[in-house]
Image (cartoon, grey):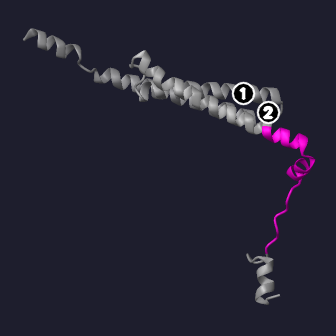
Amino acid sequence: MENIQEVTHHHHFDREAGKKEVIRVTIILTVITLIELALGFWMMGIEGLLMRNLIKGFICIFMLAKAFYIVGYFMHLKHELRNMIMTIVVPLLLFVWFIIAFLADGNSYKNLKNTYDPHHLEQSKTKVEAPAHEGGEHPDAKKESGKE
């Protein structure tokens, strides 16, 4: 009988410790979010391209830190086995790599098309003006209805 009480007491969940951990993680996520927002608003007033890119890099690092906290605590991966974590993290990293690769490929295609097709380059720089509508009707609709 003592053995059973020992085992159940050993696996007892400490509700207060769980609350403190959730509050601590929430405060950490809030502080990181506030830092990201402050950096973003600060970046809007900066003209230098190097400094803007540096701030964007810091914001990305903070976003990744938040993602790891969210995955670790709220998806309960912090307490999982290493193999279980790797089955989730490795495909996630591959997915991020695919997104980056597709964006780079699309940008390369756009740049090559502009290099080898001068007509496309000229068309991509031409701004199209929006037609001015009178009274919300299309100008051709007035001609067809005989209102003009």
Q: Quadrant of the N terminus?
A: top left
Task: State the image coordinates of residue 6 (x, y, percent, origin top left).
Answer: 16, 11
Amino acid type, callout 2:
Ile
| Distance (Cα) linking label 1 and label 2 | 10 Å
Task: State the image coordinates of residue 80 (x, y, percent, origin top left).
Answer: 39, 19
Q: Is residue 114 left or right of residue 18?
A: right
Question: Magenta region: which residues?
Answer: 109-133
Give the residue at x 84% y 38%: 112
Of tags 1 and 2, which is closer to the observer?
Answer: 1
Q: Earlier in the sequence, mark 1 or mark 2?
A: 2
Give the residue at x 38% y 19%: 79
Give the farthest residue toward the left: 1
Quickly name the residue at label 1.
55
Residue 143 drawn above or below residue 58: below
Quickly name the residue at label 2.
46
Residue 119 magenta-drawn?
yes
Tag count in the figure?
2
Q: Residues within 10 Å of mark 2 (few under 14, many from 20)?
A: few
